[in-house]
Image (cartoon, rainbow, N blue to C red):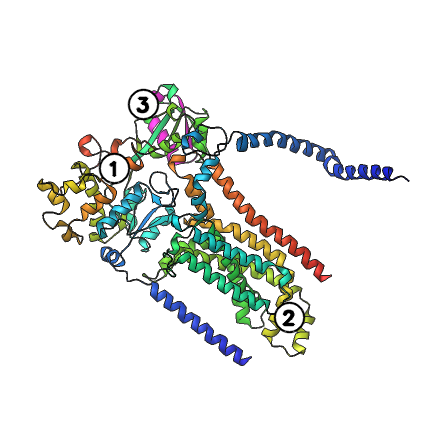
Amino acid sequence: MSAGGDEGTDGRHRLRTVLRPLFGTPVNAALTVVILWLLVTAIPALLRWGIADAIWFTDDPKDCIQQEGACWAFVGAKARLIIFGRYPYDEHWRPLLAMIIVLAALVLSADWRQWRRRNWGRFLIGLWAVTIAASSMLMAGGIAGLESVEIDRWSGLPLTVMLSVFGIFLALILSVLLALGRQSKLPVIRWLSIAYIELIRGVPLISILFMAALLLPIILPSGFEISKILRAQAAFVMFFAAYMAEVLRGGLQAIPRGQYEAAETIGLTYWEATFKVILPQVFRLSIPSLVNVFIAAFKDTSLVVIISMHDLMGTTNAAISDPAWSGIYIEAYAFTAMVYFIFCGGISWYSQKLERHLKVGRR
Amino acid sequence: MGLHRKMGGKRWLASLAAGAAILAMTAQGASADTLEDVQKAGELRCGVSDQLAGFSFLDDKGTWTGFDIDYCHAFAAAISGDAAAVKIVPLAFNQSFTALQSGEVDVLSRSVTYTLSRDTQLKMDFIPPNFYTGQSFMAHAELGAKSVEDLDGASVCVLAGSVTERYVADYFRARNMKFTPIAVEQEAQVPTVYESGRCDVMTHETPSLAIARRGFKDPDAHVILPEVIAKSYEAPLYREGDARWGDVIRWTHFALVTAEELGITRDNVAEKLTSDDPVVRTFFGVDGDLGEQMGLKNDWVVNVIKAVGNYGEIYDRHLGADSVLQIPRGMNDLHERGGLLFAPSWR
């Protein structure tokens, strides 16, 4: 029994476990060969386009149009437009700082190691109140010597982050009420909740956005005016609340009856029982599926393009319509795709970590 | 628990009241007199196309630029003397009419084709067209085609199922000419397919052809033929039933055209102000009170020209000789030079 022999069989075994799924059956083998061939042909071409033949710096768009490779100089020229959109050029530091504040608050509240601390919930509520106040003051200005910037000029990545973070946050609050309402013993509340959830889920997000953009100004008495951004934000909150409510309902149904009964026996009121006993367990159960909805929500904010708002996707479209750089667009979309990937990848990575953490905690 | 509920109820009422207050604060009096409303608000809300190269797009610094945008600035300068007193409202095509009707914008300055059905069925009125265009053809220069007459038997790239496809068919059939349509499914791909040589000719609205040509490897290897079929005359719009407002919009356009006729530009407007020419003096409001009769200032034209220049300057800056698009003036030239632009007498 030599160590070397062991390593040999071990290595061969490992090789076999790798190769079997790839070449185990004729179909698998064929698929593997085709995919390998595609990779071999695609990757060098992609590298040649994206790196070797690419133009990194130029001030003259003509240099790019005559070239085979990617024109990253275009992204360089348009990066600030894509990220900050119509926000006044000299004030770009403000949305940048606001975004950093919001993301920092997000990271702080996402740290599960802190969740068990006393009064952490209250701290988080305070933190978010400060975050929302600080970031909107930074963006809107008009105080502390900051130039006032009207809400319709908020655009690009800050708008995407704002629409999704605040949208998810508000939708989550609404969805808790809806999920509880759907389980309620009071028929009117139950029916209303069911009607709301089913109505919203039965309608595509696009049509809700269109209603917010087109119908609302007509329905509202003339003279009443709500910014289009706020209308879109409300549409997102309404839409995602319905979906999150269904996720939470799944969590609610998974809580054993005994938990309710036990809470009642020790004399807790309905609200005390709900907030102290039931909801913490519901959230723990539903977090993976909720995070799923969050990712969808982040990406779906790009639908505001159809009501001609300039979120990240909208500013990308705006960047490629400059006649001076006519015909160049793949590079801008690649850049934007990368930004979306960083955000969605981040959320997804966190959700996996959290899932693992929670499973460990339950065992 | 009772106490709990009561407090909750009060808080709810308080937030409702706060919401109502916010709504009331944002409310503005809207009446049938748009000019007065805009003057009171100190800001014109100008609906534009959300992105159209040359007409309205965001530059590197996130500022709106383009032909349609300069018209917004001209309207604002006419009304308040300040070309910057305008809020640009980007609108997708399907939203723009509702936005105008619901009062979300005061005027539409976007590429809307003037048609009978739009004028009569929607509650909007057009001013005379400020941009004349239509469908044109672009051919590979090596074919040597000088006009559409030379295109008998050519293959033509068209957008599948589009109006342009039908217009080409009608045009060729009426002249007993043959062509092979190459239908392309996606609009963005039409230029790519054409450039690759799959077809001899591509057809689209003239500015779109110019924009597409700019993106080609060798723009000089393609010619836009002179014929324009299927007219598309584009004009700004305002809400129906507000004649005074319509006058301001219409005559701002006429002022831009008249200034070009009189040779007044952004650069020489100051020196022309001291002109002895009675026509120029009336135009600038040095003599008479035509401006005040309209509800504007007497020198409103001066503010317009100082802000954006005359029609020709706007055109050249965004679409013509000084722009990357290089679209010839063609129909968009003054009447006296064989174009379609006109302005009634300034009296």
Q: Is residue A343 visible?
A: yes
Circle 1 residue: B313
Looking at the picture, does residue A73 appear above or below residue A171?
above
The mark lying in front, picked from 1 and 3, is 1
Residue visible at 42% across and 60% down in the picture: A137
Where is residue B222 shown, x and y percent of the image? 38, 25
Q: Is residue B222 above or below residue B185?
A: above
Does A272 appear in magenta?
no
For discs 2 and 1, the disc positioned in front in the rendered view: 1
Query: Element type at marker 1?
Result: helix
**Residue kind at label 1, given as amino acid type:** Glu
Residue A76 x %, y %? 46, 39
Q: CA distance from mark 2 to mark 1?
A: 72 Å
Element on which disc 3 rests? loop
Q: Is residue B342 visible?
A: no
The kind of secondary structure element at disc 2 is helix
| Circle 2 or circle 3, nearest the eye | 2
Crowding near the residue tagged with mark 1, few <14, some 14–19, many ≥20 C-alpha atoms within 10 Å? some
Residue occupied by mark 3: B147
Chain at tag 3: B
Label 1 resides on the chain identified as B
Cα–Cα gap, marks 1 and 3: 29 Å
Q: Which residues are magenta?
A: B147-172
The residue at which mark 2 appears reads as A277
Same-chain check, marks 2 and 3: no
Q: Earlier in the sequence, mark 1 or mark 3?
A: 3
Q: Is residue A8 above or below residue B118?
A: above
